[in-house]
Image (cartoon, grey):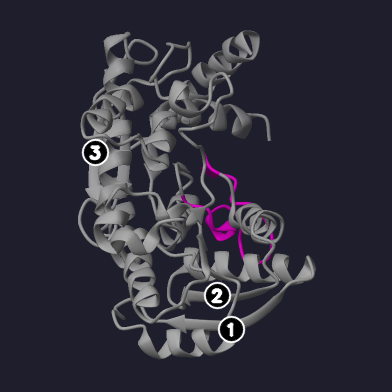
Amino acid sequence: MRARKVIATGWWLVLVAGLLGCGGGTSNEIVIGHVAPLTGDIKTFGESTKNGFQIAIEEANQNGGLLGRSIRTVIVDDKNDPTEASNAAAKLINQDRIHFIVGSVSSKCSIPLSEIAQANRVVMITPTSTNPKVTVREDGTRKDFIFRACFTDPFQGAAASKIAREQFHAQRVAVLYDVGNDYVKGLAEFFRDAFRQAGGEIVAYESYAKDDVDFSALLTKVKAQNPDLIFIPDYYNKVGLVAKQARQMGITAQLLGGDGWDSPEMTKIAGDAIEGGVFTNHYSPQDPRPGFGREACGVGQSREFAAPVARREAREDLAAHQVPHAFAAAAVGQKNDIIVHLCLYSSD
């Protein structure tokens, strides 16, 4: 691992030297843009990734920057809105003249962001966008300037299906999803297909809109089917409402979801209704393996690759009797992932 890290750094220096002429800033700085939802419905995710991004850059600058040049950041709020994400990309590329882009958080924002970055040959890496369309075109070809630091939804959907079948022994499952959200809709489809392939039955497959807050009609249909499990692959704010209303209606089915659940805000919204719920994620703070879980975030024994953002968030979260969530953990490696993925890019 140490040898590979040295080699990767060498490739990074060569590649950066070739790409820096395309951006703005002074001759003594490298400009990296960060796009995240700092306001809007999933702002807690945006805040975590922004903190990780900023602290990683601060650490890099304290260690001499890159190629003897300091790194300057430009941060733009996309409000978890695709149009805002497109506007952010145009601003960063045309006005701020950034060299690289880190972002966004949600797939529905990262997809249009990636199209603009790709068209302008600007390297972009998203820490948490899991929909395949972020890095792959409709015709199946790869966007060769676009990368991600997380798993994809085909993998996540299959993992959730396996949990439903093997851990909860579910045979009959209901799926509720936001039809207008690329991440939610895609993950619902991948789960559905994997669950059916595993021999399970989807007894209800119901959609709702982004601004819906009353799910009684959908839940009435679900309750009539008496499923063993309900899969809700949405963000914490929406899942919390669905879970609370489901329990109020007397639905006792196991609840299962994706990485969008991972926020301390979930229990504030859902209360006891979400107790016992399970979701797939990029890491688990309970993972006992060396270098994983809380240890990977610097909680416990210190390790070579423990990141400063996670250590800081860990201290803050533990003070509030919480643990670092996955969007903070994903943000940890953004700077180093830019290096690694640019190295891979240079060898294509």
Mark whose residue sits in front, 1 or 3: 1
Determine whether the residue tagged by mark 3 lies in a helix, strand or loop: strand
Judged left or right of residue 188, residue 234 is left
Residue at image mark 1:
204
The earlier-in-sequence mark between 3 and 2 is: 3
Distance between mark 1 and mark 3 Cα atoms: 45 Å
Q: Badge 3: few (under 14), some or many (20 or more) residues near its Cα, within 10 Å?
A: some
The spot of residue 305 in percent (x, y) is: 48, 17
User: Label 2 amino acid?
Assistant: Val
Residue at image mark 2:
175
Vertical relation: 106 (above or below) 63 = below
Range of magenta residues: 129-150
Distance between mark 3 and mark 2 Cα atoms: 39 Å
Tell me what residue is drawn at x 35 percent, y 27 percent.
310
Q: Could you tell me what secondary structure mostly forms the magenta stretch?
A: loop
Q: Which mark is residue 74?
A: 3
User: Label 3 amino acid?
Assistant: Val
